[in-house]
Amino acid sequence: MKPIISFKDFSFQYNAQKNPTLKHINLDIYPGEKILICGASGSGKSTLGNCINGLIPFSYNGKIDGSLKVDDIETKDSSIFELSTKVGTVLQDPDGQFVGLTVAEDIAFALENDCVEQEKMFAETLSAARKVSIENRMNNAPYDLSGGQKQRVSMAGVLVDKVRILLFDEPLANLDPATGKSAIELIDQIKKETDTTVIIIEHRIEDVLWQKVDRIILMDDGMIVSDCDPAALLRSDLLKKYGIREPLYLTQLKYADVDINNIEGIDCINDLKLDDKAKKQIVKWYTSQEKPEHINNNSNILEVEHIDFRYESSEQILYDVSFAIKKGEMLAIAGKNGAGKSTLCKVICGFEKQFNGKILFNGEDISNASIRKRSSYIGYVMQNPNQMISQAMIFDEVSMGIRNIGLSEEEIKERVYSTLKVCGLYEFRNWPISALSFGQKKRVTIASILVMGPEIIILDEPTAGQDFYHYTEIMEFLCELNRKGITIIMITHDMHLMLEYTTRSLVFYDGRLQADKSGSAVLCDEDLVDKASLKETSLFKIATDVGIKDPVSFVDCFIDYDKKERSHGKQSS
């Protein structure tokens, strides 16, 4: 069969860079294949995707060596318009893709450009909308939709053009767990119904492998280091070697000394089949573990009592929310998009004022305290560091918040330097922020809050869009702050984070607090997972498959054992 995409000794170097980003790529992708391209940040996977859809070289300039053909077209001799008729791209952020005032207008955009007559345009637009189950939202504004609905509109907008290749660039990054799971199922459904070639660029392998893929392309340093079927890659040590998180169910099998070479369906949790020997090994591993206990006897640092909130001229967002957080806790707030998580944290920080109820900090009622007063003991870190940063230099950004509290310049300098040392940024103290990586910018925003001396830090999606290396780096840094006595609250869609790093989770849906228990208990509660748009952990499936009656305890044992193994690995290295 003739490939629909063919790289031959292909290299690409951006004009602004000294070295090539892609180096000697040789890769053939065939019609109807479903391919996952993964790799750590900076590995070149997004650049590879931009070469396929024509953004390189027509939007991002640089030097090309070798050949890349898409549907028999040499891309460097083509145009972005011609390639757009072959490749439909769904971006990580759908908002950057919308051009219509309504869903129908946005889906029909390509047809209007092609001057398709109206009756045919209406029929094809409706057909594309039905393929992604968004036909009941045709008159809505795209920006008013949920994250999952926005992604469906983006998919319909490229499907209507009848492209032969669909390219998804980190499709799970901004979606809650259940919506991400639905997106993977929808991509699989579209592939099967249309026989479109599908390429998914994503580092969250376990989530993509909710449905089968044909091949996984693993990239590192601009090169393809592996191109094989998923089972072969999972059975190798390449994921660990190149800084990619392997699926939790695979790690569990290894901890129980199961021979993964003999396990069927290892490339998709839905198809995993454990034989009797493997089941006995897993049960034996579980029964040999000490059951971990997490007890916090500290006093309450924050108490929220009967909070109700609505925006002006809007429906109610929060209903009778009450909970308490102890000093030194590391806690997750979870739930689907629009459940009220971020609104609750804005109320706690004082960004939103008109609410009913009471907020206590160390027993003192701060319900009417100013934002400035609250910021001295509660800090808030936004998801995107670029939305918080306003200064050009690191020192200026970190010192900005303490310049109006009566400190001398020497005291400011001492406090900033001390904070930068805690955050691992001292060596960059005289650097411009523009020279930092995304993860380092995130640390700068945390430092700008930490310098204020808060006892609580609230972080909105601290690991969003991070590969496993940078995810671990940020979380270990937060754990270090937590060990110094700072209470950490994280709004998150990341179920791994909830399991690995927190002892409690507050779960919201429909503006109400529906659960207050451990992450393992949350993700082993099928009814709660469904209602709150979460995603069950693959460890729960392992536990039920082998007949363990207390899956929560099983998951807790895995997390405790995994922490010890990773800690031992760090000490060994």
Image (cartoon, grey):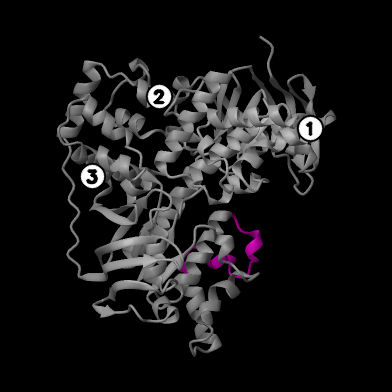
Is 498 placed left or right of 30 in the picture?
left
The structure residue drawn at horizontal position 25% and vertical position 20%, both measured from the top left corner, is 278
Magenta part of the chain = 420-437
Between residues 165 and 520, which one lies in front from this camera angle? 165
Relative to the observer, which residue lies in front, 514 or 101?
101
- Give the residue number, with chain letter if any, for mark 1: 115
Viewed as shown, does residue 23 lie left or right of 271? right
Amino acid type at circle 2 is Cys
Disc 2 marks which residue? Answer: 268
* 556 to 74, vertically: above or below: below
Quarter occupied by the N terminus = top right
Residue 489 pos. (x, y %) = 35, 61
Residue 432 falls inside the magenta stretch: yes
> Residue 563 location in percent, x, y?
31, 45
Mark found first going from the N terminus, 2 or 1: 1
Q: CA distance from mark 3 to mark 2?
A: 24 Å
Indicate whether residue 258 is drawn in magenta: no
Whole-percent x, y for residue 36 in the image: 54, 28
- Check disc 1 and give the amino acid type: Cys
Could you tell me which residue is drawn at 34 percent across and 56 percent down? 511
- In the picture, which quadrant includes the C terminus? top left
The numbered mark, 1 or 3, whose residue comes first in the sequence reads: 1
Q: Which residue is mark 3?
A: 521
